Image: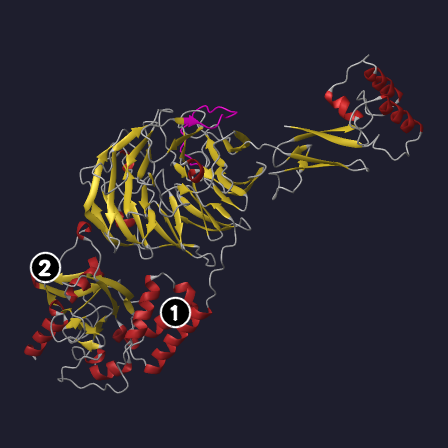
Amino acid sequence: MRKLLSLFLALALVISTVATFSAEEEKAFDGYIYMTVERNTLGQGFVQEPIKVGYYEGDSLADITERMLGDRSTFTGDISNYYLEGIKDGGEPENWTSDEIPSDIKNALGKNVNGRTKDDVLQAFDYTSYSGWMFTVDNKGIDVGAGGVSYADKADTTHYTDGSVVRLQYTLYGYGEDVGISWGMMSFDTTNKFVDRSDLISYVADINDENAQSEYGTAYTDAVKLLNTWNVTEEQIDNAIKALDDAKQSTPDEPEDTHNVEWAGAMNNFKDGNQVTDTKVVKNNPEEKWSYELNRTKGSWGSYYAGQSVIVDDYLYATGGGNLHKVDTKTGKGETVAVAGSTAFYYDYVAYGDGMIFVSTSNDIEAFDIDTLQSLGKVKGTFSQYHPMQYNKGYLVCNGNIYKVNKNSDNVLTQVGEGTIGGDSFNWSQGVFANNYYYVVATNDIYCVDYKTNTIKYQYKYDENRTTTFNIGGELAYDSTTDYLYWGSYKQKNLHAVKLNDNGDFDKETYKSATISQETVCAPVVYNNRIYVAGQGGTIDVINGNPDDNDFLSTIYTTNKIGMKIQSNPILSTGYEEETGNVYIYVQSYNAPGNIYYLEDNENSTSGELKQLSNLSTTSTAAYAYEQIAIDDEGQIYFFNEEGYLYCYGEKHIHNYTYETLLNGKHIKTCDGCGESEEEFCTFENDKCIYCGVERSKYIYGDINQDGEVTVQDTTLLQKYVTKLAELNDVQKECAMFDHMDKITVKSATKIQKYIANPELDTLIGASFYMYSK
């Protein structure tokens, strides 16, 4: 018996050498296996529900187990002579008794069971003298200790492979007889027991990995309940798998987003972080279309803060003064539609995704239905002062925290994993979605993350000595044409670059850092082998962005200074490039009143000037402009200055009018550019077009002296004008041009006399008409 017990401890209770891991050593796993930790022989269920665990091909099964258990494992000896004694499981379930041990096991024991040695740890020799933790790999016991089980292309009793199902089960009887591992020393009835449940375990683990439990409803909860049962039949396993398949097929696909999304949020509009648009953004004849008072609650620094902008279906959504505002982009008329966002401290971030508006403050994130503007729920959190928010395919990232989004769930936002990515700080860090991963920069490290699981795939410590105020990382831009990532530095005047390998890892041999003229909190913009970096120096550095050039990352030129600094991410428009050969880069000045400037550049430019585009009608008492620029499909620019106003700037429209005068006195005109098409009339409210701003005034044909009626005095004034005894202004002359007359003559006065005598005459005299002015 002593020899058997020794073998049991050596093979089944995991004596092995186990590696330790630090965040710096994390790299892409070579594959994944599925694991569970089960107490089904006790009727106490899972310690660890089915889970995917990554491995490297040099790992033993003991290495992988430690990676999965972490600080839940208890052991004796040192790391080179590791003996798994127990697992912290939180103790027995409430109200558990030994009666819940399956009857077959209790009958085999033939006596009462004992209790535990430690309340919250399940360890060897608890309950019985035969107990401990046992391994199976793909439903077979292992023939060596877990430290001797290694990777191979095919699994067997000494090897695991990619996708293997490893069950760590607690045995009560026969050193494993009750979990399907027989040493041939003790009898146990195995009839209709120990069917292979590997396929169901891996299925449930994949659902857990995708955080998709709610998509399967009761089929998922029933499957977990079945796996929590000691003895099940093959038919039960097959039925559970079929129920999951049926539930997945019956789950309706998310409806296609039919909204016209023109701007999904400052940090959210370009998934690769590279803010390049082919829209023809306003540059010629700019004019202020409207301004809207967004916030009148002063913040702690004397400014009126606001959130970033989202533009959907011709409405702009932004926060200010603790409210979510909805503003008509055509007219500038707006209203508050919900209580949302901060009232006075720092900035809110606003993002759009799949029919929802997300608003984040320093304390929470709230989701709103874009159609009803009703709150769908919020999640509490502690975020940095600057916490860019980005949405992609059902996942939301904010300040390094990742959330699964389910619009139809009671919990619309569910955090993926625990805490931030790698436990790091991501203040003022905009990441990018690329290669099915999320990339983001912290103070010293750049991360590649499987955002569906919050698992670090790759990590690169690009600068271990860097320090920065407020733990500000950097804002990323990805150039898909070269596979390079770029980011700047706050408190260091550096631009960083690294190439991504085909598998999404960082090619550390390509990493390069170069000194530029200024520190920055802005995301670079990359286009046509040029990198544009706006920053704390109030200029734009234009950098060589050709990785194949010996002067890669060298500065081509630096623009003029437009104020203390620039903290708005530049936006580059290629809309005019085909006709002019130039691109245009737009930024907002940090200084009051927060005007917009643009740079004209092309591939041959060796110098350039930032030119002022806007000329705001209000000033800002204290402009710390960080709220980002937004652009709609028509090339209009929307921006906020910290006097509390949201502005729309567009190209001044040259109005080409077509007039038609009808006999009933209705005088109409069309203005190209108004409404939804060039043929649509202006729409007037209070005699001003809500689209183009043209104004109209109402007059009466024949009312020459402008007293509001047609009388003999009008005839007299008109006769004096014809005989050059009086002058008429332009409006008076227009009032005399009735009935398609091409000039004013004595016949004009005669027609007015006939109208006064008989107002029923077929004439326009007495009819109203409009004149228009801009």
> What is the magenta segment's predominant secondary structure?
loop
337 lies above or below 599: below
Specify the quadrant of the image occupied by residue 237: bottom left
The boundaries of the magenta stretch are 611-629
Residue 489 coordinates in the image, percent (x, y)? 27, 36
Q: Nearer the viewer, residue 297 or 595?
A: 595
| Residue at disc 2, secondary structure | helix
User: Going 43% across and 35% down the picture, which residue do you hit?
Assistant: 580
Q: Residue furthest right?
A: 757
Dot in front, 1 or 2: 1
Callout 1, which amino acid? Tyr
Residue 98 coordinates in the image, percent (x, y)? 27, 75
| Residue at disc 1, secondary structure | helix
184 displayed left or right of 660? left
User: How much space separates mark 1 and mark 2, taking CA atoms?
Assistant: 38 Å
- Residue position marked by numbered label 1 in the rendering: 220
Callout 2, which amino acid? Ile
Residue 198 coordinates in the image, percent (x, y)? 28, 74
